[in-house]
Image: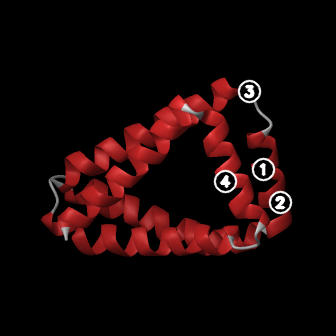
Amino acid sequence: MATLVAVFGGLMTLVGATGVVKPATLMRGVTSLWRTGLGIHVAVGVRLIMGGVLIAAAPSCRLPEAVRILGIIALVAAVLIPFFGSQRLGALIDWWASSPPGLVRVSGLVASAFGAFLIYAGV
């Protein structure tokens, strides 16, 4: 199970690196996914799956308490996302997508660092 944590970390690191190297590509991908109407479902689904995997894999990870807490946070986020509503989240995504590339790069760095942490914890 810890390998799945590392896989999630690798995917997150790749997405974050895309934001650092090609911020416009990441912004286009996120906004186009959101506009299909699937964005909120993908956001909830990814967090549910990731939260469940993190909680289940925590005992076999290098930093079990940290991984378990991150899993709980992911599950809480998955539950709360629908309460914010599609319009409000769409406005947030539009704001993020229209922000300067530097902000997207910083977001990518944060995502990459989080992904690297998950890789470390899962290997």
Picture residue at 76% right of the left edge, 66% below the top: 84
User: Mark 3 is on which residue type?
Assistant: Pro
Mark drawn on residue 88: 2
- Horizontal and vertical percent for residue 72? 42, 67
The answer to whether the residues at label 3 and label 2 have Cβ atoms under 8 Å apart is: no
Crowding near pointer 4: few (<14 within 10 Å), some, many (20+)?
A: some
Instruction: Name the quadrant containing residue 26.
Output: top right
Q: Is residue 53 above or below residue 108?
A: below
Secondary structure of residue under mark 1:
helix
Of mark 4 and mark 2, the one earlier in the sequence is: 4
The answer to whether the residues at label 3 and label 1 have Cβ atoms under 8 Å apart is: no
The answer to whether the residues at label 2 and label 1 have Cβ atoms under 8 Å apart is: yes
Q: Is residue 98 above or below residue 60?
A: above
User: Mark 1 is on which residue type?
Assistant: Leu
Of mark 4 and mark 1, the one earlier in the sequence is: 4
Q: Measure the C-alpha gap from mark 2 to mark 1.
A: 6 Å
Q: Measure the C-alpha gap from mark 3 to mark 1.
A: 14 Å
Of mark 3 and mark 1, the one earlier in the sequence is: 1
What residue would you read off at disc 1? 92
Instruction: Name the quadrant containing residue 87.
Output: bottom right
* Visual colour scheme: secondary structure
Picture residue at 39% right of the left edge, 44% below the top: 13
* In this view, the mark in front (3 or 2): 3
Q: Measure the C-alpha gap from mark 4 to mark 3.
A: 15 Å
What residue would you read off at disc 4? 30
What residue would you read off at disc 3? 100
Q: Measure the C-alpha gap from mark 4 to mark 2.
A: 15 Å
Picture residue at 48% right of the left edge, 75% below the top: 48
Residue toward you, 10 or 123: 10
Of mark 4 and mark 3, the one earlier in the sequence is: 4
Crowding near pointer 3: few (<14 within 10 Å), some, many (20+)?
A: few
Secondary structure of residue under mark 4:
helix
